Image: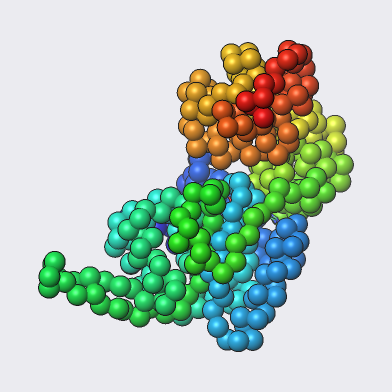
Amino acid sequence: MAIVSDDNKNINKPLKRNPVVKPDSIEYDKTFENSIRPKDFDSYIGQSSLKETLKITLEAAKRRNKPLDHLLFYGPPGLGKTTIAGVIAAQMGVDIKITSAPALERPRDIIGILMSLKGGEILFIDEIHRLNKVAEEILYPAMEDFTLDMTTGKSQTAKTLRIPIPKFTLIGATTKAGELSGPLRDRFGMIHRLEFYTVDELAQVVMRTARILEIDITENGAKAIAMRSRGTPRIANRLVKRVSDFALVKYNGIIDETVANESLDILKIDKYGLDTTDRALLNLIIEKYDGGPVGIETIAAALSEDVRTIEDVCEPYLLQAGFLQRTPRGRKVSPEGYRHLGVKQPSCQTSLFDM
Ligand code: ADP
């Protein structure tokens, strides 16, 4: 069973499991991410309404000497759901165990992790919408009454034992709040959507990361990277690293606006942050399906991509930027999408059924 568990001290340290990691591997990304993850509210940039609410909720829990309510964070990947969970644990002075729903396949996986929790600890479950029914059923009494209901014996002699477990806080994260079952959603005391970041906020993320990694960057250089980061800190951080390679090898080592823009052009990331996959997606709908609407499975198959990658990674930003529209009959490229790609939109393309 692959439960990735960390305490809140380790969340900011590289993973120890595999000291030799390949660049571009998931492991490498995690090591890099953990090294630059903000640890407190001050270094957690943006999401101001979330931070304000959390500060009050945390203070109230501390004054009452009670564990925090269960919290659910949702929004596209890379917006800071795991990071804010770590910040909360650090603020509360408690440990955090991190896992994800696909690692909780068998009942004993979730039972094991629940029984290992200590009082007040935080359990973070990523991709919580992928939790199976059995795991969900085990979670309900654990979340509500801090008990595990275990059945022993068979049919008529079966008995349910209620085993108390320490009070804990569950923090769930999901890219798809809509796929969470009603009963599970109802058991969270607070549900919050993380928003895409503004260019100014992302420029602060870039400056902070550059400071930690000792990369020379000007404010305009940071802004140029921020503009192409799709509103997402994880992408901003990756781009700073990529651009710093260019700055080192091709330029004088300092990232200014020109170095940032030229490097990102070479990396084929356009001025709205769209990469080759995003543009291929829009072009496919325009060229093969007259601008849409077309179903997500068809798009994924034509691009040889996973439906989940398209839905979770590409689509949210294309929708938010207004290049793509979701209709009951599938996805459509918007007039802005046509304009961005420099393709003329055929007239009389919108039918009443697509609205
Ligand atoms: P998610 O769990 O939503 O997929 P993460 O919390 O793993 O996203 O964040 C991805 C990366 O982005 C982290 O390495 C973190 O350093 C950075 N990051 C996320 N949110 C912020 C923020 N508000 N301020 C600064 N950096 C952030």
Q: Residue 247 at x, y = what percent?
A: 76, 35
When the figure is inspected, residue 288 is found, relative to residue 146, above or below; the finding is above
**Displayed quadrant of residue 115:** bottom left
The front one of 196 and 355 is 355
Residue drawn at x 54%, y 79% is 67
* Above or below 220: residue 213: below
- 279 sits to left or right of 310: right
Q: Position of residue 218 (x, y in %)?
A: 86, 44
Task: Give the image location of residue 232, x and y in percent.
Answer: 68, 45
Question: Where, quadrant-wise, is the C terminus in this rendering?
Answer: top right
For this rendering, which residue is in front, 179 or 20?
179
**Residue 348 in the image: x percent, y percent?**
73, 15
If the image is split into quadrants, where does the N terminus sit? bottom left
The image's colour scheme reads: rainbow
Can you tell which quarter of the image residue 223 is in?
top right
Side of 202 where 93 appears, left or right: left
Which of the 4 quarters of the picture holds residue 36? bottom right
Please indicate whether residue 199 sits to the left or right of residue 235 in the image: right
Looking at the image, which residue is at 65% across and 46% down?
234
Residue visible at 74% across and 62% down in the picture: 49
The reply to whether residue 137 is in sight is yes
